[in-house]
Image: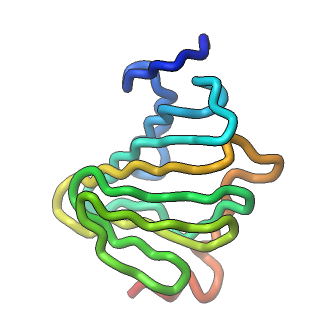
Amino acid sequence: MKKSAFVTEAEAMKEDFKGRTNYWMVRPEITHAKDLQVCRAVLPAGEGHDFHHHPELEEVIYVLEGEIEQWVGEESQILKVGEAAHMLPGVVHATFNVSGQDAVILAILSPGSQTGPFMVDVSQEPPWVSLRK
């Protein structure tokens, strides 16, 4: 793949992942980014990204369309268009679309790459497995 400063949705790295579609717009594999990863994610009604953390990555979730139930640690809040949540590396978080329509978020992660795993799923571990009723 040729790296470019401009990326259309058609050129993005498309990833179908656990009920949602991720469009990776900025990653070292696509652009010359060293310190950023940007993903536009479409979460259909009732879908989400269960409890996980990024050992080496800081993340911001910004709502573009719809609304989401965002968890940061053991706290949750409904985020609407124009609202965001911030997670430091290692902080467990989750994103769920509890509405009846698609939600679209922008996930911005830094740095652009990591040496260990990108993500660690903790959704089946206490307290996360029983946190969300």
Nearer to the camera, 78 or 34: 34
Quarter of the image where the C terminus is located: bottom left
Question: Which residue lies most toward the left here?
Answer: 100
Question: Is residue 22 found left or right of 35 in the rendered image?
Answer: left
Residue ID at (38%, 63%): 84
Q: Is residue 45 above or below residue 88?
A: above
Nearer to the camera, 37 or 131: 37
Q: How is the image coloured?
A: rainbow
> How many tags in the picture?
0
Q: Is residue 88 above or below residue 45?
A: below
- On the image, the x and y values in percent for residue 50 come to 50, 67
Residue ID at (18%, 56%): 101
- On the image, the x and y values in percent for residue 19 come to 40, 51
- On the image, the x and y values in percent for residue 46 come to 29, 63
Residue ID at (62%, 59%): 58
Residue ID at (55%, 16%): 4
